[in-house]
Image (cartoon, grey):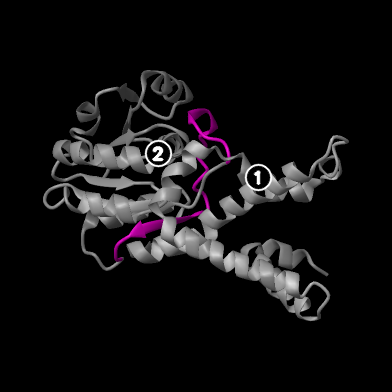
Amino acid sequence: MLFHRVAIIGTGLIGGSFGLAMRKHLPNAVVIGFDREAVLERALARGAVHETTTKLPDAVRNADLVYVGLRIGAAIELLPTIAADASPHALVTDACSAKAMVCNIAKGHFSTGARFLGGHPMAGKETSGIDSADAEIFAAAPYALIGSESDPDARLHGFADLLRRIGAKPVWCDIDTHDWAVGIVSHLPQLVAVALARVVQDETDETGLPLALAGKGLRDMLRLAGSPYNVWRDILVANRENISHALDRFAQNIDYLRTNLSGKELEQEFRAANDLFDSLNPDHRKSQP
C-alpha cells in the first residue's frame, strides 16, 4: 500500500465521498481533512475523515496522497502552497471537471519532488456538500487520469489501482482530449437541462399548464437542472471553447430535427439515439423482447 496517510483538501461532495471510500476500502490508511470548520465537523461526524485541520500545511505535510476536491478557482489558488508543503514522495491529484487551467498551473509548481496527476471522476450528484457524500459514488464510473499508462512512476499506478479498489474505471487521456470529451458528455447535458428548464418555466401559464402535466420523463430530463450555479461557474469559464463547440453541434442537430419533423429521416435519428442509449444501458437491451 503506497498511501498510508491521505489528505483531502475540500471535504464536500467529491472530497467527502473519496474520504468515505477510503475509510471503506482502505481501512488502514489515515485520512485527514482540510476545509472550513463547519464542514469539517460534518465530515468527521459522517466518518469521512479521521482527523481535521483548518491549516493547509498541516494537512499536506507528511501525506502520501493529497486529494484536491475543490472547485477549479480554489484549486488553482491553493496548488502553489500544496506544492511547497507536500512531501517529496507524495502524489497530489485533483478532481476538477476541466483540466487545462489546473494542469498548466500545476506544471509550473510540481517540477521536482511531489508528483501531480490531473484527475476527474465522472461521478456526482445534483446536490452538493458533505451531507450528500457517498462511498459508492465512484462505483462503475469512469475516472479520467491525465497522463500515460506507460509512465513508470509507481505513484501513478498506485493511484490507478486505488481507484479500481473503490470501484472506479481509470481512463488515461491527455488534457485537450479530456476537455473536449467532457464538453460533449458532461458540460453540454448540464446546459441542455438548464435550457429545457427555462423553456418549461417560461411556457407555464397561470393555470399551471403545461407543467401540471409533467411526468417522470421530464423529471428524468431535468435532474441535472438541480445542480447549483456556484458548482458550474468555474467549469463553464475554464472550458468555454469546448462547451461553445458542443452547443454549436447541439444547435445544428436541433435545426436538423426541426427541418425533418415530418420526414422519414427522423426514423434514423431515433434509431441512432436508441443504439447509443442501449450502449450506455446494456441491461435495457437485455430486457427487450
Q: Is residue 92 left or right of residue 209?
A: left
Say if 282 sits above or below 140 in the image.
Answer: below
Image quadrant of residue 54?
Answer: top left
Question: Magenta residues?
Answer: 126-148
**Left of 259 or right of it: where is 189?**
left
Q: Secondary structure at mark 1?
A: helix
On the image, the x and y values in percent for residue 206 come to 85, 35
Separation of disc 2 and disc 1 at Cα?
28 Å
Residue linked to disc 1: 223
Is label 2 in a helix, a strand or a loop? helix
Q: Which residue is mark 2?
A: 22
In the rendering, at what x and y percent does residue 176 appear?
36, 65
Answer with mark 2 or mark 1, whichever residue precedes in sequence.
2
Asked whether 24 or 221 is in front, the reply is 221
Q: Residue at position x 65%, y 45% from top?
A: 223
Query: In the picture provided, is 167 more to the left or to the right than 260?
Result: left
Asked whether residue 126 is in view, the answer is yes
Q: Main secondary structure of the magenta part?
A: loop
> In the image, what residue occupies the spot 33% across and 65% down?
174
Residue type, numbered disc 1: Arg
Q: Number of numbered discs present?
A: 2
The magenta stretch spans residue 116: no
